[in-house]
Each structure stands twice: as C-alpha cells, then as structure tokens.
Image: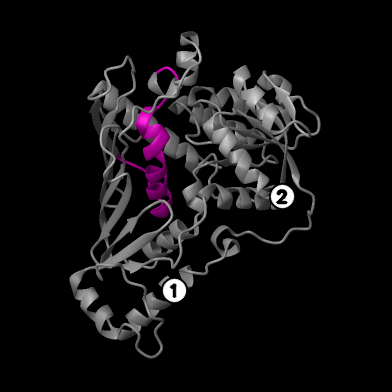
Amino acid sequence: MKRRDFVRISALLSAGATIPVPVVSGLANSENTKPYNIGILGYGDRGSGLHQVLNSMPDKFQVKAVCDNLSFRVDKAKEKFPTGIKFHSDFRSLIDQKDLDVILIATPLYLHFEHAKAVLDSGKDLFLEKTMTFNIDQAIQLNQLARKYPKQTIQVGHQYRYSPLYYKVKEMIENGWLGKVTQIEARWDRNHNWRRPVPSSDLERQINWRMYKDYSGGLVAELLSHQIDFINWAFDTTPTEIMGTGGIDFYKDGRETFDNVQVAIRYGNADMVGNFGATCANQHEGYSFKIKGSKGMVSLLTNEGFFYPEPENKSVTEYVDGVSGATKLSWSDDKKGIKILDNPTRDGSFYALEDFYKCLNTKELPSCNVINAGKTAISVALANRSIYEGTREKWDARYDLKR
C-alpha cells in the first residue's frame, strides 16, 4: 500500500464515522410532511419491537392498528396503548381499516405470502419482514404481484442493507480495499433452546412455529438469511451451488427444525465460497461475520466492525498513521484492526424504516425489494432443501427475478 493509498483509505474509513443516513440510503427531503398511518400484522417479539421503533419516528409513522390472532398479545397491546389504536384478531379486518396507508407484516414465515398478497390486492403499501417468502414458488409469485401493482411500495426487512456500517463495508468492497475476496465466514450462535413459553399446550405450534418445518425455515431463515442477503447485495451475486448439513443435535424436545446447521455456498460468478453456520448449543462467537480478501479482511458485528489489512499493508499503515494529510485511524485494542466507524450504529430497523418513508414519498424502488430479497428467500429455501434432503442444489435461471 503506497502512502497515497493510505491517505485514501484513512479518509474512507474516517468518513464512515459521520456518514449520514441520506448518503447511506438515498434519503431525500420530501414535500410530504404528514406521517403515514400504519397497521402492524403480527404482534410477537418482532412486531411489538418494530412498534417501538416506529414510535421513535412520529413525524414519519403513526401506528393506528395492531392485529394478532392470539388474544393475549392483543390484550397486552391494549393495556400499553389504550387509546388511538384499533385492535384486530383477523388480518382481513386489519387490511379493511380505511385510514391505514401501510401494513407492516411480522407474522410467521409460512404466512408471509398469503398476507402480503392480501395487502397488495387491497391497494395499500407494504413493509414485509424477512425472510420474504417461505418457498421458491412464493418468491416468484410475489415478484409477479409486484409487477402487477407497480405504484405500491414494497420493502423487505433485511435491515443491514440500510446500516451505515454495512453500507460502508459494501463501499469498501466496491472500491477494492479488500482486494479479491474469496472466503466468507458467517455465524449466528446461541446457547438457548429458542423456545417461547406457551400458556397452553394447544398453542405450542402457533407460538413456537420456528420449531416446525411446516411453518419455519429454521436457523437459516431466521438468522443466517441476513448474512446471506448481505453477500448477495454487496457483491451483486447469487449462489451457483449450495450444500448444507445439520441435525437436531442438542435439544431433543420434539422440534423438527435443526438446532445445528452448516451451509457452504459457492458463488461461481464471483469466485467465492461462503460458510454460514448456526448452533443453539454454544454462544461464544454469537454473531460473527468475516469477509476475507487478498488485501484485507472485514470482521463485523451487528453494529460495529474492523478492517484487518494483510501484513504487507498493515506495516505501511502503522508507519504512516497520523501523518500530515491523513486522518488518524482508530485501531483495535490489539493494534491489528482499524475501526470502520468510530461509534456503533443504531438498530438497523431504524435506518430501514427511514428509507421506507423516503420510498413511500418518492415511489423509488427500495434498496431491499421483492427482486433482491426474493433471491435471498430462494437462496434460503435451497439451503434448507439441501440441509433436510441431503441434496446439492444448483441455481436455476428461473430464480433470476426481474423488475
């Protein structure tokens, strides 16, 4: 790395410390000053959590309705929000509420397509949580529906696409700071059974739907889809081959989805291999995401990350750190990595909803849309087919969704 290259990377990384959402997401000032009325369909952990994020941006969104077919969730919401919100137990009643502009869907994965189709048929705009659909055919059908309703805004909830940190890493990749990337290592581990308490046994499958294959894409859909989606997006690629394995290796509790998985993805068009794994029996690494190139590696958490130059680059950066014309870099405690941003980012959902507001106003295509999020959903479905059926999956031309 020559001195002028160091100056450039120093400026690049220091700029990331203050990179504003408008640069990250394309957010622009809009003539619209009225918040959008939004209804939340599905009020479990994710739906209620997004309600809190929406409440932090009252100039953009007003939650006017909540829907869940589990009465105890609706009752809790009523206690917390006794006025100003209508409550529903049937999604059709929610969608029919006249004063709503937008429906946010945070229901179990197997219901995503049915609910998304109903929203689009009603003429309302849609924010659909990840993973976009449960299977490949649904991803293709939702892509067709989006073309049928071009005036409606549809955004999918892979929120890391909107994080200033992850946007900066994408920029670093595009500008060649990692060199030729050949390896991705991604994990999302925990030491927990992943179960929710149930008030009665007849609600087991409805509440713990993530445990059952008819309703859930398991660890790949619920966790690893974020990292798979980022690679598809950052490198503008899709898998060419997918091989997976796994098992119910720890929690012998009647679940059907695996508690231990590993997926190897070949990106033949990009000359890369990705390794994506998750376990429910060890939390040491937690969330980890490493992108390895010939010039350096990026190591990411959800809200902060470091760039690790290869040895021939590191010696130069150490020598010129703080020289005239270069912004002083912030090194990791072990002096081996350079901080990508000075401060941790906010919850990625905040940035995603900021951008959703912009797209509602401008009618631009969201960065995470039915095309690229659909390709991620297809990648996840192929990975699960490989895991459960022991197959080696190939990407097919019909999976190349179009606008």
Q: Residue at x 40, y 24 (%)?
A: 195
Quarter of the image for the C terminus: give it: top right
Q: Amino acid at mark 2?
A: Lys
Answer whether labels 1 and 2 touch (C-beta < 8 Å): no
Taking 336 as reference, is 378 above or below it?
above
Question: Residue 263, how many percent across, how many down?
Answer: 27, 36
Question: Residue 299, how many percent across, how many down?
Answer: 31, 57
Main SS type for the magenta part?
helix
Taking 196 as reference, is 190 above or below it?
below
Among numbered discs 1 and 2, the one appearing first in the sequence: 1
Which residue in the structure is indicated by mark 1? 14
Few, some or many residues within 10 Å of mark 1 (<14, 14–19, 20+): many
- The residue closer to the viewer here, 109 or 372, is 109
Q: Amino acid at mark 1?
A: Ser
Task: Name the secondary structure under disc 2.
Answer: loop
Quarter of the image for the N terminus: give it: bottom left
Q: Is residue 229 magenta?
A: yes
Total labels: the figure holds: 2
Residue 283 appears in the rendering = yes
Q: Which quarter of the picture shows residue 114?
A: top right
- The residue closer to the viewer here, 329 or 11, is 329
For the magenta stretch, what is the residue range?
213-240
Is 21 on the left-hand or right-hand side of 251? right
Q: Which quarter of the picture shows residue 148?
A: top right
Farthest residue in the bottom direction?
Answer: 324
Which residue in the structure is indicated by mark 2? 60
Q: Residue at x 46, y 64 (%)?
A: 343
Q: Residue at x 30, y 25 (%)?
A: 258
Task: Name the secondary structure under disc 1.
Answer: helix
Q: Which mark is residue 338?
A: none
Is 369 on the left-hand or right-hand side of 398? right
Q: Is residue 303 magenta?
A: no
